[in-house]
């Protein structure tokens, strides 16, 4: 029995050969879905991405890559994944021979993002990579280059850029409904006694890498500008847990036109807010980066109601449609690179005692 890809390819050849004006509805029933393989079956894949893929219209879960053999049977049973679509980290490159898989989603510790993104790209698969994109800017550039070389797309898992109210922030950065932005505050964090690999420097741990990219990325799209300078200070109140990495990071971003963003992130305190002050008013989101229930308001009484759809499902459908229609991605690799360039400066400033550094 022909799979969907072969059907669509052959349908396209028939159309090209005959040049007949077949109406589009004749092929509408055969909607193309991209096959996704999740790389890494930790908490985010298990509790967010795999369930979200059951709600998507343009992609579906077809494969897994894991280093934990004991997880395989339950994933196969729950999601109907055949043996032929199960891989480990040593044989993941063989996914190149699997036409069921169109996209590889990297859901691994930060230090592993670059390596497995490049493996996926060299296998000829599109790549979705969780945030933060990589450990440093050089790794980001290698990831982008590998995807360009293999003519595949690279999207970063910035789900908030797909969320309704955060997209309103992006729109208001252009339209300035409350006058020019003057200042914003953004904070994202949670209290953790058991951070696991997120407390290990070599794995890409630390509050800034894990949660700090939320206020960083949000500051960029909420202002619609790129920062030109940064100052930062890191602190750790529980060195017995966070001996290698930052438990808390406070940083200030300076943007063109005198705009400043005061940001905070932590593994020692719950925080989840975005506040924007403008010349003629203000607006906010609280929470601004939760998996659901993102809501807010404005100084003149407008209410920003939560999105009712699954954020991760919307994110993956948006990225799938961009690939299918060959349209721009909402959060491509270049966007992830811009964050990592600033993130490196944040750590450098913190190491210099809060010195303001140009970006």
Image: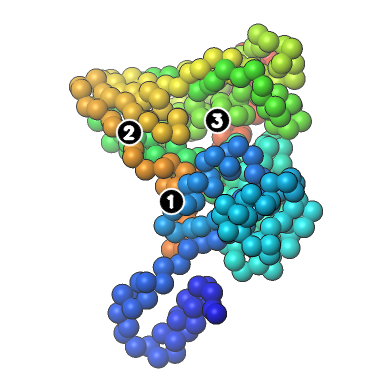
The residue drawn where x is 33% and y is 19% is 277
Residue sitting at x 57%, y 52%? 78
Would you identify the image quadrant in which residue 58 lies? bottom left
Q: Which residue lies furthest to the bottom in this view?
A: 18
Residue 78 relative to residue 309: left or right: right
Q: Name the residue under label 2.
A: 306
Q: Which of the two discs, 1 and 3, sits closer to the camera? A: 1
Separation of residues labelled 3 and 2 (CA atoms)? 22 Å
Residue 143 seen from this side: no
Under tag 1, what secondary structure?
loop
Foreground label between 3 and 2: 2
As drawn, 329 above or below 300: below
Q: Mark 3 points at which residue?
A: 213
Indicate the position of residue 1 as horizontal and vertical percent values: 55, 80
Query: In terms of depth relative to the viewer, which is nearer, 345 or 201?
Result: 201
How would you rate the neighbour count of disc 1 (Cα within 10 Å): few for under 14, some for 14-19, many for 20 or more? some
Percent x, y of residue 185: 43, 19
- Compare residues 165 and 331 and report the one nearer the observer: 165
Q: Which of marks 3 and 2 is nearer the N terminus?
A: 3
In this rendering, would 66 be left or right of 127?
Answer: right
Quadrant where the C terminus sits is: top right
Residue 201's place in the image compared with 62, above or below, is above
Residue situated in front as seen by the camera: 84 or 301: 84
Q: Distance between the residues labelled 2 and 1?
A: 18 Å
Read off the residue under disc 1: 55
Q: Nearer the viewer, mark 2 or mark 1?
A: 1
Q: Which residue lies furthest to the top in this view?
A: 237
Residue 76 lies, in percent from the top left, at: 63, 55
Label located before the other in sequence (1 or 3): 1
Label 2 packing within 10 angstroms: few (<14), some (14-19), many (20+): some
The 10 Å Cα crowd at callout 3, few under 14, some 14 to 19, many 20 or more, is: many
């Amino acid at each position: 029995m022909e799979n969907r890809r072969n059907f669509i390819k052959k349908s396209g050849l028939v159309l090209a050969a005959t040049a007949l004006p077949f109406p589009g509805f004749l092929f509408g029933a055969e909607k193309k879905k991209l096959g996704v393989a999740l790389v890494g079956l930790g908490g985010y894949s298990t509790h967010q991405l795999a369930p979200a893929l059951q709600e998507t219209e343009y992609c579906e879960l077809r494969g897994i890559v894991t280093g934990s053999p004991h997880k395989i049977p339950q994933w196969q049973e729950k999601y109907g994944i055949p043996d032929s679509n199960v891989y480990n980290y040593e044989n993941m490159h063989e996914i190149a021979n699997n036409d069921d898989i169109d996209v590889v989603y990297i859901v691994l510790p930060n230090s592993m993002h670059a390596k497995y993104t490049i493996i996926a790209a060299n296998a000829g698969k599109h790549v979705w990579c969780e945030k933060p994109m990589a450990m440093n800017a050089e790794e980001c550039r290698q990831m982008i280059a590998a995807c360009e070389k293999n003519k595949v797309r690279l999207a970063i898992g910035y789900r908030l850029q797909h969320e309704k109210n955060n997209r309103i922030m992006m729109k208001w950065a252009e339209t300035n409904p409350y006058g020019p932005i003057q200042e914003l505050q953004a904070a994202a964090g949670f209290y953790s006694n058991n951070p696991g690999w997120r407390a290990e420097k070599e794995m890409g741990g630390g509050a800034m890498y894990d949660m700090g990219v939320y206020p960083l990325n949000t500051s960029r799209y909420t202002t619609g500008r790129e920062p030109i300078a940064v100052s930062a200070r890191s602190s750790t109140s529980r060195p017995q847990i966070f001996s290698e990495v930052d438990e808390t990071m406070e940083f200030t971003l300076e943007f063109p036109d005198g705009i400043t963003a005061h940001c905070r992130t932590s593994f020692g305190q719950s925080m989840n807010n975005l506040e924007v002050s403008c010349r003629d008013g203000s607006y906010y989101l609280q929470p601004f980066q939760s998996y659901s229930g993102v809501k807010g308001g404005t100084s003149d009484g407008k209410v920003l109601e939560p999105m009712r759809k699954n954020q991760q499902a919307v994110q993956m459908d948006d990225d799938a449609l961009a690939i299918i229609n060959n349209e721009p991605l909402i959060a491509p690799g270049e966007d992830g690179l811009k964050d990592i360039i600033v993130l490196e400066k944040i750590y450098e400033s913190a190491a210099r005692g809060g010195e303001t550094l140009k970006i």
